[in-house]
Amino acid sequence: MEKEKKSDFVVTDRRKFSVDGEPRPDSVAEPAPPAAEQSKTAPSEPVAAKPEPEPTPEKEPSGASTQTPPPETGYNAEKERGVFGGEKMEFVHLLDLLAQTAMLYAGAMEGGKERRVDIVGLRQMIDLVSILEEKTKGNLTDHEKSVLSNMLFQLRMSYMEIVNLIAKQKTTGTPGAPQK
């Protein structure tokens, strides 16, 4: 068996500086990159370089100086306007996102084939919103404060309903099951 094969792969160190940070003596005069494809298709005659014409300044049309550049699009334009995804993001949008997540945990929204209640996840979301209320006290507008307190109240009531249903199921059995 042949363990050592001759490879066409060649590694060439083209770094301009050595490990010490000093310029390498062989990197000062860079060799021209090989033109393998050019030599295969071009004749062996030397090709004369065409001199590039000097750029001539073009005359601007009279209306060109008044034209505005095209509007920027994408992330940079949205960043300049402070608007992402079509509308400005505000604190109320964050609260809406947290409320939707909490309601998903409460089983109020479909999360697959069947609705599932994640009582631990719901409790963590309520705690998270409570911390948010505590940390933002004094920094919210009246509207934001109202939305936050109403949301927290609704989440706590949903949590209590679920806990009461679980406690009732433990004492009476599964709802809808035939009683003896």
Image (cartoon, rainbow, N blue to C red):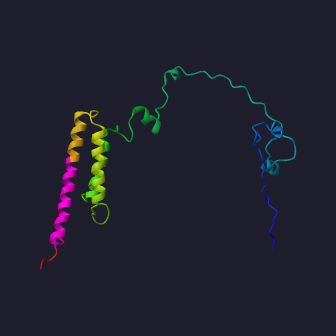
Q: Is residue 155 magenta?
A: yes
Residue 136 falls in image quadrant: top left
Quick check: 134 above or below 154? Answer: above
The chief SS type of the magenta part is: helix
Hey, which residue is sitting farthest bottom in the picture?
180
Nearer-the-camera pick, 80 or 147 = 147
Hey, which residue is sitting farthest right in the picture?
45
Nearer-the-camera pick, 113 or 149 = 149
* Residue 109 in view in this figure: no
Q: Does 158 sit left or right of 14 as displayed?
A: left
Could you tell me which residue is drawn at 27 percent across and 54 percent down?
123
Quick check: 6 above or below 48? Answer: below
x and y percentages locating residue 150 in the rendered image: 20, 44
x and y percentages locating residue 176 in the rendered image: 16, 72
Q: Give the magenta part as a residue range.
A: 153-176
Residue 120 falls in image quadrant: bottom left
Nearer-the-camera pick, 11 or 22 = 22
Nearer-the-camera pick, 100 or 55 = 100
Q: Does 149 sit left or right of 44 as displayed?
A: left
Could you tell me which residue is drawn at 14 percent across and 77 percent down?
178
Q: Where does the C terminus fall, quadrant-wise?
A: bottom left
Hey, which residue is sitting farthest left in the picture?
180
Could you tell me which residue is drawn at 82 percent across and 47 percent down?
42
Quick check: 151 above or below 166? Answer: above
Quick check: 28 above or below 172? Answer: above
x and y percentages locating residue 171 in the rendered image: 16, 70
